[in-house]
Amino acid sequence: MLHSLALSRGAQERRPEAITIFAEALQLERSLANRPGIAQALAALGLAVLHNGDAPRARTLFEEALHIRQAINDTWAVALSYDDLARADLVEGHLQTAVALLKRSIALLYPMNEQLTVSYRLDALAWACALLGQGPRAAKLAGAAAAIRATHRKIHLPIYAPPHQRLCPRP
């Protein structure tokens, strides 16, 4: 419940409120010693903090979530943690590190047949490559991501869609 409330506050651009709610959720999960819940709350708080402009604090939260997810052998969540860390690296301009983390995330997700999730990682990888001046590679990656989504036929959640897709109506 706290997680949903915090997400709605974040989506409404009420980030400080979302951060407070995610911090409460983290405290609750810690009191319950719920390791998967702690990791999820850490990651969610990290994203809220990152979107509020504090990449170093976000990185610390993401790293703690990653360690927990590795300890409990949650491969899918580990892949998400790599993605979260890559976001922090992109914000801080550590493009090569972001590329390496995104590749690790994709390598874990691909065998799980997580096509839609992989497509969004390919988009982030394309963005990083474009920032590195690797235009042709970025175009190929973005094209691959779009092709996956075109054939996947799942409903796209607006929160995960690239900004230009959120503004354009769906056919």
Image: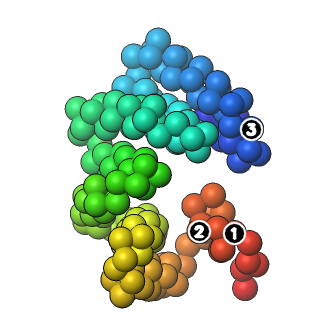
The quarter of the picture where residue 109 lies is bottom left
- Judge the density around disc 1: few (<14), some (14-19), many (≥20) Cα neighbours within 10 Å: some
Question: Distance between the Cα atoms at labels 2 and 1?
Answer: 7 Å
Where 68 sits versus 126, above or below?
A: above
Question: Distance between the Cα atoms at labels 1 and 3?
Answer: 19 Å
Query: To which residue does mark 1 refer?
Result: 166
158 or 74: nearer the eye? 158
Q: Is mark 3 on a helix, strand or loop?
A: loop
Q: Is mark 1 on a helix, strand or loop?
A: helix
Can you say which quadrant of the picture contains the N terminus? Answer: top right
- Judge the density around disc 3: few (<14), some (14-19), many (≥20) Cα neighbours within 10 Å: some
Residue at 44%, 17% in the rendered image:
30
Query: To which residue does mark 2 refer?
Result: 162
Type of the residue with mark 1: Arg
Report x, y in % for residue 165. Answer: 65, 74
Type of the residue with mark 2: Pro
Query: To which residue does mark 3 refer?
Result: 14
Residue at 51%, 23% in the rendered image:
26
Type of the residue with mark 3: Arg
Q: Is mark 2 on a helix, strand or loop?
A: loop
- Judge the density around disc 2: few (<14), some (14-19), many (≥20) Cα neighbours within 10 Å: few
Q: Please give left or right for residue 143 compared with residue 72 in the image.
A: right
